[in-house]
Amino acid sequence: MSIRRMASLISITLALLATLAAPVVFAQTIDAQRSSIKVTARQMNVPFDGNFRTFAANIAWDDAKPESSKASIEVDLASFDLGDPSFNEEARGKSFLDAAKFSRATFTSSSIRSVGGGHYEATGKLGIKGVTRDVTVPFSVKDEVGRRVFESTFPLKRLDYRIGEGEWSDTKTLANETTVHVRLVATSAR
């Protein structure tokens, strides 16, 4: 065997090994029917829930190196649903989400770190109603029946984002702290 041919075989072998050793990165396609973004709030200490019906998420997940993963979520604020048309109109109005002026809420990760046991933290920018803040969001990743599931529950202070202005800024009537529940069910697409 010639030196050239041996060098070619070594080069091909090394290229194949490099390909096999590359991290597995999955672009995640979100299953909107199985996914949800919900908010729990308290009015006069009585809890109530609302759902965002329309949202999109882009997730590039690396099983081998979660810290190199990225995520972004965009939520249609006009899709917020409290289960009653008059409540929906109020929630989407200027005092609360002001969906006519600020149509989207967004989250874009800047870093992700493992905290062990399938649990992680994503740090990034959360923008709602023209206000953008740095946040750290805890989340878990697990596989369920051939699907990858990203779940998070975290507190959000609504007044930090000017949600509930005017008479609704009174935290005795409407609590400042709300809880956001995110469940993104994804199928992997390489």
Image: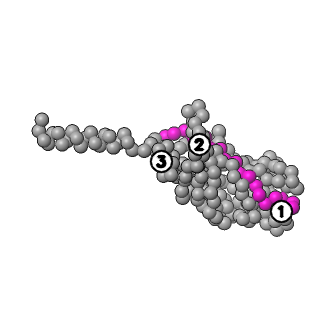
Q: Please tell me which residue lies in front, 124 or 38.
A: 124
Residues at discs 2 and 3 in contact (Cβ within 8 Å): no
Report the span colored magenta: 171-189
Evaluate whether residue 52 shows in this view: no
Mark found first going from the N terminus, 2 or 3: 3
Point out the frontmost of discs 2 and 3.
2
Q: How far apart are labels 3 and 1 at the CA level?
A: 42 Å
SS type, badge 3: loop
- Where residue 69 appears, as percent x and y from the top left, is 51, 50
Q: Give, as a three-letter code, the residue at label 3.
A: Lys
> Horizontal and vertical percent for residue 136?
62, 57
Relative placement, left or right, of 189 versus 162 is: left
| Residue 175 shown left or right of residue 73 in the figure | right
Instruction: Identify the residue at image location x=35%, y=42%.
Output: 19
- Residue at which label 1 appears: 171
**Residue under the image location 80 percent in, 46 percent down:** 83
Foreground: disc 2 or disc 1: 2
The quarter of the picture where the N terminus appears is: top left
Q: Is residue 26 above or below residue 132?
A: above
The percent position of residue 102, horizontal first and vertical second, equals: 67, 62
Residue 12 placement: quadrant:
top left
The answer to whether residue 28 shows anywhere in this view is yes
The residues bearing labels 2 and 3 have C-alpha atoms spaced at a distance of 14 Å
Find residue 186 and name its label.
none
From the image, tell me which residue sits under label 3: 65
What separation in Å lies between label 2 and label 1 (alpha carbons)?
36 Å
The amino acid type found where label 2 is placed reads: Gly
Neighbor class of circle 2 (other Cα within 10 Å; few <14, some 14-19, many 20+) is few
Residue 117 numbered tag:
2
Q: How many marks?
A: 3
Q: For residue 187: magenta? A: yes
Give the vertical position of 162 relative to 27 (above or below): below
